[in-house]
Image (cartoon, coloured by chain):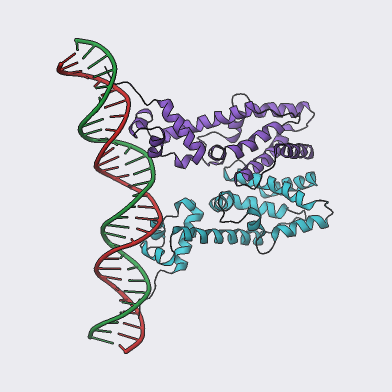
Chain colours: A cyan, B purple, C green, D red
Amino acid sequence: MARKETITKEVIFQAAFTILQEEGIDQVTARKLAAKASCSTQPIFRVYKNMEELTEELFEKACVFFQDYYAEFRRQTVTPFVNLGQAYIQFAGEHKKLFEFIFLSPDRFGKSMYDIINGTEGYISREIQAARSQGSKNPSDLFTKMWIFIHGAACMTLTGEYDLPESETMQLLKNCYHSFR
Amino acid sequence: MARKETITKEVIFQAAFTILQEEGIDQVTARKLAAKASCSTQPIFRVYKNMEELTEELFEKACVFFQDYYAEFRRQTVTPFVNLGQAYIQFAGEHKKLFEFIFLSPDRFGKSMYDIINGTEGYISREIQAARSQGSKNPSDLFTKMWIFIHGAACMTLTGEYDLPESETMQLLKNCYHSFR
DNA sequence: GTAAAATCATAACATATGTTATACAAAAGA
DNA sequence: TCTTTTGTATAACATATGTTATGATTTTAC
């Protein structure tokens, strides 16, 4: 009864996500996306109401992408916040455009930074719990301080002002933790 | 022999700087600038070769603007880095678009963050010297740590994730300093 | 095989932007 | 006053972008 769809939503979305990763959200334009997906601009607007809707889906995906990144990230350390911090900093370095999009946009589609990092798995809550079980009196406050530091390192990574090997970052964060507790 | 100039470079530049402050560098466009300066786009290109040249001058001015901001910023504290950090964080909150332009752009026209903050007055060097005279063994390292923290707070200020009154920021930075030393 | 319906490409419309061509306006020397 | 020179406005050109109108293509029910 009708023509078969050849350019699926998945194809379009994947192309968009690739552009997002490589060039940033500003470069996810209808025509560039069409070129990446080897089609015209029409299929985009069949699948998405407008570019804004696509942007929102990209944001959701980027958040999950970060959470998956962290889930895969395992280093040998028992100090709370250190793993999470390392992942965050390394993510900023390896996925600059995603980091910018997720963590430096003024508008995060209503989600706070903490919501994003915490995710469905409660990654932050777990770390705070770990700090508590290690005898921290005020683990939330400790997290706040640690996170300001971690976010600072990540943002400096973006602009190339922070660039240390994993082992040194780990040591730095450990020191930081012990300084703050 | 020739018509008198009515739209001076100063008028154009000032209009551009106002747009930069209020809406960010992306919104400093030829037409918007012309409207702000109440003229056509022609005088802009008489005075500036192109928009890129204007952007570069805006950047230079923004750096000086920050340095002047810090020069004016005096709070009662003897702990090194605390005044500078407070100024930096408060600047991020009060001049978001300038902060973004200066400290979060990937391209800073060749200037490093440290160059900008240090300025002609050596603001960073002074603080490091102060830390040294207060008995710090490794004041450079101390500065690095403090600055990562300060930059983190400033970047979180941008997105509204950090928002403390001056007195609390001061206390936080003091604590931070004593934790790190 | 034809008609209906959905998919897609082409091309257009509308707006935004950097930049430039043209012509008008004004100042000053002749 | 006229001419020259320079500043300015108008309007254009070129490109980029979101979005939509049009029509061609393809699939499937009949």
Q: Quadrant of the C terminus of chain B?
A: top right
B121 and A57: which is toward the camera: A57
* Corner quadrant of residue A31: bottom left
Instruction: Give the image location of residue B49, x and y in percent.
Output: 37, 31
- The residue at 64%/50% (across/down) is A89
Q: Is B111 above or below relative to A133?
A: above
Instruction: Give the image location of residue B132, x and y in percent.
Output: 75, 28
- The residue at 79%/40% (across/down) is B179
* Corner quadrant of residue B103: top right
State the count of labels: 0
Residue A20 seen in render: yes
B154 and A36: which is toward the camera: B154
Instruction: Give the image location of residue B60, x and y in percent.
Output: 51, 30
Q: Is B169 above or below relative to A104?
A: above
Instruction: Give the image location of residue A92, x and y in percent.
Output: 60, 50
Q: Quadrant of the N terminus of chain B?
A: top left
